[in-house]
Image: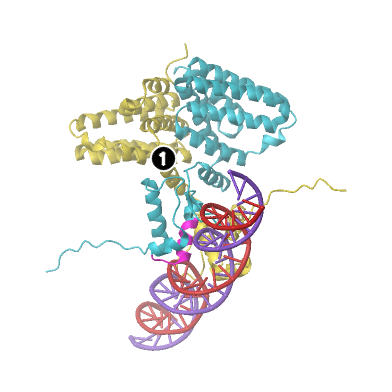
Chain colours: A yellow, B cyan, C purple, D red
Amino acid sequence: MTHKAAFTAVKTVKAYERVVEQIETAISKRELRPGDRLPSERELMLTFEVSRSTIREALRVLESTGLVRSRPGDPRGPEVLQASPAILTKTVSRLVRLETIALSELVEFRIMLEGTACTLAAQHRTELQLQAMRSAVDAMQTEVAHGPIAFSRADVAFHVSVWAASQNQLLQICGEATRGALIDMVTDELDRAPDSRARMELSLAHDREILAAISAGDGATAGRLARSFVIEYYGGIISPQSRAALGNVADEAPA
Amino acid sequence: MTHKAAFTAVKTVKAYERVVEQIETAISKRELRPGDRLPSERELMLTFEVSRSTIREALRVLESTGLVRSRPGDPRGPEVLQASPAILTKTVSRLVRLETIALSELVEFRIMLEGTACTLAAQHRTELQLQAMRSAVDAMQTEVAHGPIAFSRADVAFHVSVWAASQNQLLQICGEATRGALIDMVTDELDRAPDSRARMELSLAHDREILAAISAGDGATAGRLARSFVIEYYGGIISPQSRAALGNVADEAPA
DNA sequence: AGAGTGTACTGGTCTGACCATGTGTTTCAC
DNA sequence: GTGAAACACATGGTCAGACCAGTACACTCT
């Protein structure tokens, strides 16, 4: 009598992958905590019963994932690292760079991010973060005199402080990634030298408005302002429909 | 006379890292495109003048980044892959699991994405995409009878079709990534079996509403609906402030 | 022309070796 | 006793060479 055997697909799993998996789950189950040391490669090859090449390949992928770090000569062995969103940034930027993403898509995405960040910042900001944003704006004021490059740096710093106040790291990461990508693709940051003074003043005024809304805890206004300012900046790049759709989300009640 | 020598810090760079870097930039400069094949490991060790171990370690990190794939026995060599959000998903899930990223942040992010996707879809959708979304909803209707798993699959398909209609690949990528991560985290998709029928009907009704708004070209409504439905689903996870801030963006004119 | 066979080369893994480096200890001078 | 210098040792980085199982592709044979 032949049973209906519940066979399941077998996929050959490479040795180093199983090593990775075991160490990974050990970390995610908190059996290994940041700062802890893994056994040396030579010890690991004994416990896993594989060769050093296999151990090393496993360590390389763990290292590229930001979970551990090996340093030559350290007798204490590879270090278990604190998980950090930093590697996400790299992945996201590469994806943006690679994916043949249209500039318009990037701008749309940016509008969304900036708006949400400001909305959330208005709700979540701590007093400390509020101070940070204020001083960032003050710094922008100062930098107006030092030319567009310095000003732009201060501008970025303000936006970073807003992202931080949103208390959402995914927002921060994507913001960082899109900023980098946008700067890569739009290089008019430099050739807009002629009317630079006016534009700096305008940006400053915008950021002050946003800050006021955030400070007042008015998330809807903060988000709407942020969106409209990004649109003002990059609006020419995206379609009029997108402009209308993304810009008016907050300030027009549906008919 | 001693010049002021412009010496710069030297950091010892490991051999496999330089291999990774070169291949990576080749990919990002489109000299290597998805589907292309890398030379075999034995050839690579000749061109880079390193040993096979080094080449292999480099390939392992490239593979863990999702850039290439090696298959044993394939005489054509390692394959250059299409950049995919899958790796992003894995990274995000791990960060959430390690509590580097709070689940609430993920949900907030998701609300933003879903809302914007629907808003843009309402503006950008082609007739073809509209049909796709319609048939996706119809499929959901059919799958109600086949249980929550099949229904959930159809539900996902509908949302994917919406992202596609948004004409924004970044949205698609991030949507895909957050969806995977959320499913990893929130596994009540299965244990909600008791009232599954009611919830399926509710989801279906929601999606129909969204589709109607998209179909009518009403981006503001589509976005507002999408946000509120996500909040209805995952609302318990995020703070009341976030709920209010993200949910009411579209439907309440600022006081 | 199609089905089966063969083969050359692939990636996966192992062994064993060498080197430069960082840590912890020991030694030494004061 | 205390601080600095020298040492020993285990570590990670790299290399060379080997074996095996598997795949793609060409070559049979019918």
Residue B153: give x, y in percent of width and height.
64, 32
Residue B138: give x, y in percent of width and height.
63, 21
Q: From the viewer's perspective, is residue B140 above or below residue A16?
A: above
Q: From the viewer's perspective, is residue A131 above or below residue B42?
A: above
Which quadrant of the structure image shows residue A113?
top left
- Out of A112 and B171, give the one closest to the viewer: B171
Identified at 52% across, 26% down, the residue is B162
Is residue B58 inside the magenta stretch?
A: yes
Is residue B71 inside the magenta stretch?
A: no
Q: Is residue A89 left or right of residue B206?
A: left
Task: Please report, as a chain letter, where disc 1 is located.
Answer: A
Q: Is residue A13 left or right of residue A237?
A: right
Q: Main secondary structure of the magenta part?
A: helix
- Out of B191 and B251, give the one closest to the viewer: B191
- Out of A42 and B134, give the one closest to the viewer: B134
Q: Which residues are magenta?
A: B49-60
Q: From the viewer's perspective, is residue B215 above or below residue A141?
A: above
Identified at 37% across, 23% down, the residue is A239
Residue A253: give x, y in percent of width and height.
46, 14
Label 1 sits on a secondary structure element that is: helix
